[in-house]
Amino acid sequence: MSKLANQDKFLDLSDYGRPFGRLIANLCKNTFITPVHITILFGITGLCAAYFIVKGCFVVAGLFLILKSGIDAADGELARIKNTPSYFGRYLDSVFDIILNFLFLMAICYVSNTSFWLMVVSFFCIQLQGTLYNYYYVILRTKSIGGDTTSKIFEDKTPIAMPGESQQSVAILFRIYKIVYGLFDAIIHSLDRKAYKVETFPNWFMTFVSLYGLGFQLLIMAVMMACGYLHFIIPFFIIYSILLVIMIGVRKKWIK
């Protein structure tokens, strides 16, 4: 099962790791390995990236950031291949992402001697950017006939656990998810309250919005580190937030 129906598929600039993710998923499809195992692996990969940033091995750190994006795509692919969708895996994936994003920026802040509070602002901006992408993407997935509906437009109540997963575990992870993402979701929903009423989003618009996808954000970090621009990463993502106003403006004016 694909995340989107064929007519809704678009060039996702943040999803460059998908082919590698499919390769991993196909290698694991007839094994004991589950999507949650893959999620844990991408968490470990992210920790390795943070470690190499602190050690000053920026090219290696960048490669681990890109590898993390590929492994991140594999858990969902494996879940679709094995037909084992999971709310536990969905929320674990998101919780790992926000923790790792903070660690990446903390490591960059430490090595570059950047202000801690500037790093906090940058982290806030990165999460807001990613939330906008996810908001529009989940709306598209929900409207897409035959698409994946594990994610909801409005995560306002604990979902009922799917076969094979614990309701208690789902409930705990959902509460954690709401704590760490609730503010960002509320801000984005307030900025574009009527987006969910749109019948669909044009492919060109979703490609534009994918500039805010986590995979593309990590690719920017990796390239900037490899090019010796580590000190500019934190301020860059603050300035990069200007696209948020443009994207929402385009949606409101031209996509009804």
Image (cartoon, helix red, strand yellow):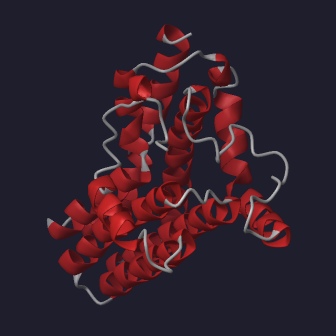
Q: Is residue 231 left or right of residue 186?
A: left
Height in image: 159 above or below 223?
A: above
| 29 sits to left or right of 178 | left
At 22% from the left and 84% from the top, the residue drawn is: 57
Q: Along the line of sight, which residue is nearer the eye, 4 or 164?
A: 164
* Viewer-side residue, 253 vs 46: 46
Tell me: 20 left or right of 183: left
Q: x, y (%) of residue 187?
A: 68, 40
Residue nearer the viewer, 188 or 125: 188
Spot occupied by residue 248 in the image (x, y as percentages of width and height): 52, 25
- In the image, taking residue 237 as reference, residue 140 lies left or right, namely right
Which quadrant is home to the C terminus? top right
In the image, residue 48 sits, relative to residue 236, either above or below, namely: below
Q: From this view, report whether residue 177 is shown above or below residue 3.
A: below
Report the residue at 28% width, 77% height from top.
Answer: 61
Q: Residue at x 82, y 45 (%)?
A: 156
- Tell me the quarter of the picture where residue 48 sits: bottom left
